[in-house]
Amino acid sequence: GAYTHLLSTKHNGTLSSPRFKFEKGNLWLRVIGDKGASVRYSVWNYPRKGTVYPKSSPEPKLEKWIRFKTDYWDGETGYLELTTNGDHPVEAGNAERSWFGITEAFHATHDEPAPKDEISEILSPLFSTFLSVTNSRDLTVLYVQVIKDAIKAWEDNSITDAQSRIINSLIKEGILPNSQKEMPTCKNLVLKYREIESLIKAPRLAPGLLDGEPFEQALFDRGDHKKPAHKVPRRFLEAIDPTPYPKDSIGRLEFANDLLRKDNPFTSRVIVNRIWHHLFGNGIVRTPDNFGRLGEKPSHPELLDFLATKFRKDGWSIKSMVKFLVTTKAFRASSKPSAEAQQSDPKNLLLSHANLRRLEAEAIHDSMLLVSGRIKLDRVAEGESEPSNSVRRSVYRLIKRNNLDPFLSVFDAPVPASTKGKRDVTNVPAQSLTLMNDPMVIRAAREFANLHRNGDLKDRITMMFRHSLGRNPTQEEIKQSMDYLILSDQESGKEKNILLGLRGKKLKLSQEISELIEPVRENLIKNKKSLDGTKKKYLIDPVLQWNFASGLKDQIIGLQANLKNGAKIENGRLILRKGGYAVTDNLPIEITEKTLSAWVQLDNLSQQAGGVITLQNSSGSIFDSIVFAEKNPRKWLSGSNGFSRTEPFAFAPLENLADKQLIHFAITYSTNGKITGYRNGQRYGKPYSVNLYKYQKNKSLLTFGLRHLPASPQRMLEGSISKASVYDRALSQSEINVIFHPDSYVSLEEVVNSLPDDQRNLYTKLTMQIKSTEKRLGELEATVFPDKPNFQNLALALFNMKEFIYLK
């Protein structure tokens, strides 16, 4: 067999088979190894696990047969691949130790029986002798002799597979000694081995290729991969050199040399044309992905060859070429064409003026971050990709093909499934709607306006124009902006006065109610004979509850929470740092309506998008979670898959205590879809309504310290949790108060029932007045936004000007 760990399990390894043709039936591989190792077959070099691309793992304690069905790939070609944990092409892990071994691999039809691990393989050394065995004593002697021979062969480095199996079996069964206690004389050797092994450093890996056996690819008839025609020799473009590559070479080195050979003008032409396209808006060849017969001809072929030649002479330096082009007269030209140019060169093929063009999606996004003062330019690319709400440049952001950023997509950012030399430039209503309503744009406008809070009105308007558009405003623009701001102040002032009056009225009514009921509440608390009795009456039993001071088992049904990636219990809390989190076993209950509740303290308030407690399906594709600062810094929200059940809790305050002490946060999910947040017993912002998801029995679980599985750095919480609970219904505010103040709580119902009749009638009257006032407040608050000042509207208007997103 072939093994990676003959010297150490710290050694990494990859084993690939020659290419072969798949037939209907089963592939059988007999392997052994750690659970992190990968066993798979590859068709068309697809690197991931998928529906028709299975991947398996070996067992560490025994050789086992792994079966792959191959009916789907009948007629295709591929190869087998085994890798240690860190060497998988895409789905690599970071285990320090990993190993595998393989002894057999073959293909069998469906009619052939499955292979079996015969005991005779282990016992075969017993039958390889010519000794006559007639009784148990003779058999014992034979056993001793076979074992001695196997050990001697191991010492002489001449051991056979059969002898290896019998020694391995005896060690596993504990018959042969294999510990320092049993073999104290080996202690120094083991220590020396460990010392040498500690010098093995984990390799730093980068994507690359392993050369296989070279082969000629068939020409597909009309591009149909199921109709292969004659074989095509491996070679470069016939127009440059039709000589086939050597049959004993994979051809990659020859291909690289051909790309850069002096008589090949295409490589340098394509590169400089793409640089020109990026700087000027259109390439000299306007089809940068196609220099062939179906592409356009160059508008200035001599210029293209001049630049290609210069590019070669300058050592293929892209930086030098960019510097040369941006210092040319052509780059400094105005985008305003002359009357003559409009007539003779309407498409600007002759480069009579600069091309008016829209900024790329990433540049529009980054421009908003820049003018709002939020962009971070403090370091170069390093470490993990940035999350979607990052304030670094878009080039550093994580891109997922099945979850693309909607802002970038609406401005024609290409789908990263294939190369795109020339981006589409569309003009659709969704772009205007995005610039007016996208939360990122609105926040950038607010921050941009906040940068210009002080000074003379005219000066502030001028500076906003200069920072956003790169020019001073005209007198007409200044006049229109000032007229708008003055008129808006007058109109919104009236509404704000009404709003302030209603809020004052509500506050006054609340104070009157408080003066009415608080003395009664205090008397009830003082007169309680038994606090335990009160708790029993008012505390609500959860369906799941963890007090981490008591361990990792839920106190209701004993559901186990499992620590992951360095999470630990310390001083009665679940500690979640450096990627640590906890995940429960599958829930034996069905949950739809619910309340998630937790006592949590954060390590810092600058962290983003970490989950406190999450209810999710088994894969993590659907989840509901208490999340900190995913959409807005220092604000809590109800996280969900793709924000499908997520909206900000409007008017919620910024968090300012959770990094100093434990706070209680709960979110209720009502049957009618209403989602309500509570912080330290008080309602957090405004509730909203969505459609709930039903989490099925034995197909869902909870996580702590993670927004949802699978785990990734962008979903982690940094902090600690002391208690967490789940309820199978949406608790009322009074019940949330019971959780927050269990030792000094009296229900409102109990207080009202204790009031004299006249005071109870007054309480009812005041309550009705508050409800009426709150209704009017809600209607008015929907149109008057205290966090959207008039200067923010001006900033938003500047973002929506064509000048902001176009380069001229």
Image: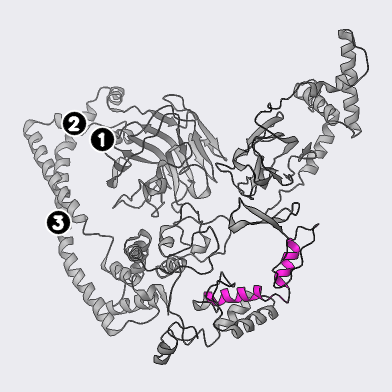
Query: Where 459 falls versus 639 (above or below)?
Result: below
Amino acid, disc 2: Glu
Of the 4 image quadrants, the one containing the C terminus is bottom left
Give the labeled residue for mark 1: 734
Write down the region rendered in magenta: 248-277
Seen at 50% across and 54% down, the residue is 401
Q: Nearer the viewer, residue 530 or 3?
A: 3
Percent x, y for residue 107? Answer: 70, 36
Quarter of the view holding residue 568: top right
Answer with left or right where residue 314 lies relative to residue 562.
right
Dot label at residue 27: none
Dot label at residue 749: 2
Residue 265 colored in magenta in the image: yes
How far separated are the C-alphas under marks 3 and 1? 28 Å
Label 3 crowd (10 A; few <14 / some 14-19 / many >=20): few
How far separated are the C-alphas under marks 3 and 2? 30 Å
Query: Where 59 falls versus 507 (above or below)?
Result: above
Quarter of the view holding residue 207: bottom right
Query: Where 465 falls versus 133 (above or below)?
Result: below
Query: Sequence order check: which comes first, mark 3 or mark 2?
Result: 3
